[in-house]
Image (cartoon, rainbow, N blue to C red):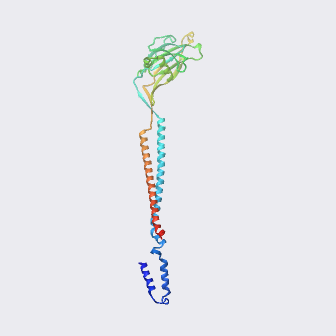
Amino acid sequence: MLRKEKSRSYREFNDEDDDEGKRSPEFFDDATEDLDQEEPNGSISQEEEIRIGSPPMRFSKTCLKNVFTVVLIFIYLLLTAVAVFLAYQTIKEFLDKHNNPVMSVTYKEVDSFFPPGIALYPGKAQLLSCKHHFHDYIPPLVDPGKPQEGDCVIKDVTYFGPFSNQTQKRALVVRGPSEVRKKELVFMQFSHNETEEDFSAITYMLFAKFSDLNDSSNEAEFMRECERNYSMWTFSGGFRTWVKMSLVKTSGRSNEAIEFRQESAVVKFNDKRPEPEQTNQLFFVVFEWRDPYMQEIKLIITANPWSSVAILCGVFMALFKAANFAKLTIQWIIKMRKRHLRNKARELNPITDS
């Protein structure tokens, strides 16, 4: 409408036959100013169109969204790193607990034990007597140093040692006590000529059940395996050695093991024999159960696989959600970038055409 009105005024100016002197200078100045402001093809100026098409408010909102998106990406990357660290720590702690089980110790009370096997290696010493007694009562010695009657069950086994096939050993295996409530004990006497050695001692070994030796098809092989798996102890001549046994049962990951622990007390023997008979050194040993409690040790793996799996599932779900959010965020940024470029190109098209 503005252009039509100005064109009509211009035609009226051309159609008039009046002289130029009749027109005022202000008239031409106004017309020139209107022509300067007017663009060809009747378009608005470039600065005016950019100002109208890109308001500051829209630019500020887009900038805030982009900043907020970057902050969210940074937070989720941080959370992802924390989740990965937690997964690593969970797996590491599970492996550590699995490889290093803890011990659980319990005591089981029993009325009686299985009679253990007492394997003695007397060497050149001679067994004088072996007898069972009850209630911790041992009667006074009668003719010490001379053979006496006994009631023990004894087996004589000869075998080659497990660590050297050239060494042959002879073991006297005695059936041990079982009635712990009655305080059953086994009392044994040995004699040995002390003139042949500077020091004298008798070695012995304890194994779980005397019946295992009777049930074994090869007694020599059974004793070889016992010597490989059980400990050896000794008692000295000239003393009475009181051995109190306790049984320890250890349950491992795949098998069970039984071993003995012992407490020993030594009392000097007052030798009242005639001096010529004192050349033979005497050994006295007593075997008894210490108490009616059997110690059981179990290896317990404190690592719970189900709790570890649950933690890992939660961690992996967090990782999946973080990856999915990062993917959607990147797609949204690309989409917003394309929209911004498209709007910018649309705004610049009228200026290019002009």
Relative to 164, say whether 20 is above or below: below
User: What residue is shown at x 49% (from left), y 78% (from top)?
Assistant: 36
Q: Quadrant of residue 201?
A: top right
Expressed as whole percent of the image width and height from the top left, the position of residue 207 reads 47, 21
Count of numbered labels shown in the rendering:
0
Q: Quadrant of residue 338?
A: bottom left
Q: Nearer the viewer, residue 113 or 97?
A: 97
- Quadrant where the N terminus lies? bottom left
Q: Nearer the viewer, residue 235 or 21?
A: 21
Residue sticking out furthest to the right: 198
Q: Is residue 352 among what the camera can see?
A: yes
Q: Is 195 left, or right, of 63 in this rendering?
A: right
Residue sticking out furthest to the left: 111
Expressed as whole percent of the image width and height from the top left, the position of residue 50 reads 47, 69
Relative to 339, say whether 259 is above or below: above
Q: Nearer the viewer, residue 352 or 86?
A: 352
User: What residue is shown at x 47% (from left), y 45% (from top)?
Assistant: 86
Q: Nearer the viewer, residue 88 or 186?
A: 88
Relative to 7, say whether 345 is above or below: above
Expressed as whole percent of the image width and height from the top left, the position of residue 7 reads 44, 81
